[in-house]
Image: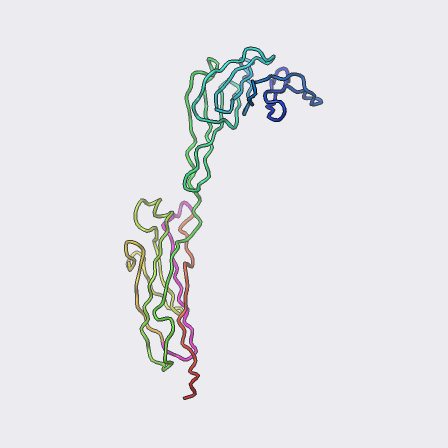
Amino acid sequence: MDPVSGRVWVSTVSNFKGITEINPNDGTILNQIDLGGGAAWALGFNPISRKLFFADGNGAIWEIAPDGTGLAEVFDPGVGPIYGMAFTPTGDLVLLDFAAPSYGIPAPSRLLLYDSSDDADDVFTTTAPTPEPVDKMHPAGAVHAYSNMIWPPNNKKVQITLDGYVVDEMSAARDGKGIGVSYAYLLVDGTKIVLRDKDKDLLAEDGSFSVTTQVKAQEGAVYKVELYASDTKPVENGGPNIGLVDSTSIRVPFDMSGG
């Protein structure tokens, strides 16, 4: 929009591919600028030079007189398709493009600023930093009990082996080393077995572990085994994330022999 005259231009991509000037009062078409079969992906009106600019499908910036004459490419910023275009009050051109997505992380948008003191062909770029993905997940892993079925139910103590692993890939990537786990422990029927804290570490380099404990072979008993862990996300960033990673159980069947 020309803030002085109030004239309004829009990009049209249906039956007519080009730039259409409309009456801001009733929406009627006042003028149409044919772009040779292409479409203007973004429009911008320079309030200093009083010139109309548009970006084509390849991202090149064109200058066009409001009456449709003088169509000429100004420059190609080389950033690919442009999704937004505007001019600052001082006549600097601002473009919006999108970087390529990576590892499932949404692509960041970039604001590209061009000094338009000479018809926008004197270029410099400022790019917003890529936002870090939000980490709200505690570590992942598993725990298994061997054996998870005790027989016979003779009320004696039985040794059980607890195997498993625990890792946090996002924390490990952020740390640049390790498995991304700052604290981990097992609860066996409410009794804690620490796997990692500031004074103890039973986790291997890949996050695996193997520990033993004892439970009573009491008829009908069910012993719950739970694995908890927290990552290494800094406190100032809202961390660490801690939670239940996995669980299993150890059972002692009822003696149905009648003996």
In this rendering, the answer to whether 170 lies above or below 194 is above
- Residue appearing at x 46%, y 14% in the figure: 117
Q: Looking at the rendering, which quadrant does residue 22 occupy? A: top right
In the picture, measured across the screen, residue 206 lies left or right of residue 11, that is left
In the picture, measured across the screen, residue 125 lies left or right of residue 85, that is left
In the picture, measured across the screen, residue 138 lies left or right of residue 64, that is left
Outermost residue, top side:
70
Quadrant of image for the N terminus: top right
Magenta stretch holds residue 227:
yes
Outermost residue, bottom side:
259
Q: Looking at the rendering, which quadrant does residue 162 occupy? A: bottom left
Of 13 and 82, nearer the camera is: 13
Of 153 and 172, nearer the camera is: 153
In the rendered image, residue 79, in percent from the top left (x then y), is placed at: 44, 26
In this rendering, the answer to whether 252 lies above or below 127 is below
In the rendered image, residue 48, in percent from the top left (x then y), is placed at: 53, 14
- Residue appearing at x 35%, y 74% in the figure: 215
Of 38 and 118, nearer the camera is: 38
In the rendered image, residue 185, in percent from the top left (x then y), is placed at: 35, 61
Number of dots carrying numbers: 0
Looking at the rendering, the stretch of residues picked out in magenta corresponds to 216-237
In the rendered image, residue 34, in percent from the top left (x then y), is placed at: 59, 17
Quadrant of image for the C terminus: bottom left
